[in-house]
Amino acid sequence: MNTGITVHCLFFARYAEIVGRTDLELELSRGSTVADAVDRVRSDVAGGHDLPTTPLVARNQQHVKFDSVVEDGDELAFLPPLAGG
């Protein structure tokens, strides 16, 4: 019985520069939260420790809180702060 899930992480702008990639597949335990995914990226991805501890994250194109549970096949977008003029 497979108890893991896979989520697709996307990195934009400065965050893509920090981790040196625009996307990755992340394997997590079933019942994991957005916070768990962020922690894994920060600990397991080269450069990930330079990401903020609480970046803005969208799950399936909707902003979510860190305690939101992720499901198999979800897309998590790591969104850096935007500045405008």
Image: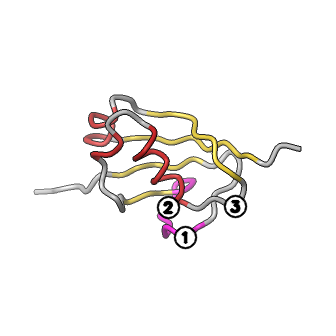
Q: Amino acid at mark 1?
A: Asp
Decide: marks 2, 1 in contact (CB < 8 A)? yes
The furthest residue to the left: 85
Q: Earlier in the sequence, mark 1 or mark 3?
A: 3
Q: Amino acid at mark 2?
A: Ala
Identify the residue shown where x is 83% and y is 43%.
2
Residue 42 position, x and y percent, is 40, 47
Q: Is residue 53 left or right of residue 71?
A: left
Which label is found at residue 46? none
What whole-number distance in Å separates the C-alpha atoms at marks 2 and 1?
Answer: 6 Å
Instruction: Answer few, some or many: residues within 10 Å of disc 1's Cα (few below 14, many 20 plus, some between 14 and 19).
Output: few
Magenta segment boundaries in residue numbering: 59-68
Which residue position is annotated with label 2?
A: 35
Numbered disc 1: secondary structure:
loop
Which residue position is annotated with label 3?
A: 31
Image vertical order of residue 2 relative to residue 39, above or below: above
Numbered disc 3: secondary structure:
loop
Which residue position is annotated with label 1?
A: 67
Residue 43 position, x and y percent, is 42, 45
Image vertical order of residue 49 relative to residue 58, above or below: above
